[in-house]
Amino acid sequence: MRALLHPKQSERLAHLRELGILDTEAESQFDEVVDLASKICDVPISLISLVDETRQWFKARVGLDAPQTDLDRSICSHVILQDDLVEISDTTQDVRTADNPLVMGEEHIRFYAGMPLISGEGLPIGTLCVLDTEPRVLTDLQRTTLRVLGMQLMRQIELRLALHQAAVLRDEIDHRVKNSLQTVASVVRMYKSRVDNAVAVEALSAVERRIDAVAMLHQELYQASQSNRVALAPYLVRVASLLEASAPSNVRLDMDVCTVQVESSTAANIGMIVSEFTANAIKHAFPGGRRGTVAITVEMSQDHSNMHVQCRDDGIGNANPAEENEVTRLGQRLMQAAALQIGAEFTLEARADGYHLNMQVPMKDAPNVELAAE
């Protein structure tokens, strides 16, 4: 006997397709469910059966070779009309299954039990079912197990959809953020190219550096497996690479950053400090084509309780201090504010052998700081 159509057949089929699971490759997490159901219920056949418009397709199966059957052979299409576990102890004695080809044919199915897979919206998409070639009755424990496995299985299927939708949304947000940052950066560059005032140009350059740093932090966050943590080394390398590209040939950048993942706010503030120090050193520390190096190092303490960030140049230092302007003073205040935001101890000194910036950054999750893979 072929089952009647579900009362919400169109909505049910639409949700089944939305889940994106039909005709997908075998996956171990689903194979493990049918294997467990078969063993707990002590039956040779177990299936995750998804009831489509004209067929039932098996996402996972044990004891049955066919990947799908038509609905004339589907017992599961009867089960999706119910709200709970359906157990048919002897398929030859039930009007729904007595004339089913699986019962009458060489498969010789004599027992069936299926738990409907019902979505959060109350729409059934298929079943988790077990079958045997002999009539039988499940124990209370076996029935409970099928119910629990079926509900957990449906949650897992819907979680797949949620993760996929989140990934699509994340891609869309990433695209929009990048476009917005590129637009703002373009406006800043346009204004910078049109002003003659040196202070204004320096201020716009500082704004441009901050926009670039934010864009790179966004990219690192997007690529990271954890939504609010980034690998510090590649992020700082990318920040420095932009500055190095604008540096004169007489100035070289060295960077040695330990392998560690930090919170995005920590990375952002360290990146801003490194960016400001490096930009100021490039501009003021090596006048008249003097050759020199700007060195950035980040080291972890032995107990991983804090990071030591050091920025230094081997320029003229306090021998001939550059004339300060409001932009320079603002840059120093911003570095101090950034250090304060992450609870870091901060010192900036002009010495005879160049400028030295030292910062101790406490690690919030010490001693279990998360090291990135080498």
Image: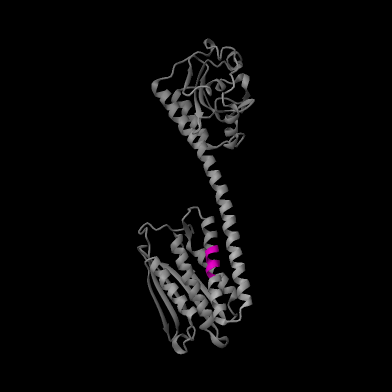
Compared to 34, does 323 lie above or below? below
7 inside magenta stretch: no
Quarter holding residue 306: bottom left
Which stretch did the figure color magenta? Answer: 209-215
In the image, 193 versus 347, the foreground residue is: 193
Compared to 169, does 271 lie above or below? below
Residue under the point 52% across and 44% down: 163
Where residue 34 appears, as percent x and y from the top left, is 50, 29
Question: Which residue is outermost to the top?
Answer: 93
Query: Viewed as shown, does residue 273 lie left or right of 243?
Result: left
Q: Is residue 260 visible?
A: no
211 inside magenta stretch: yes
Question: Which residue is outermost to the bottom?
Answer: 319
Where residue 214 appears, as percent x and y from the top left, is 52, 64
Where residue 367 appears, as percent x and y from the top left, is 35, 59
Query: Viewed as shown, does residue 307 lie left or right of 122?
Result: left
Colour mode?
one colour
Compared to 291, does 101 lie above or below? above
In the image, 109 versus 191, the foreground residue is: 191
| The N terminus: image quadrant | top right
Where residue 335 appears, as percent x and y from the top left, is 44, 73
In the image, 326 versus 101, the foreground residue is: 326
Quarter holding residue 186: bottom right
Q: Determine the main secondary structure of the stretch shown in magenta.
A: helix
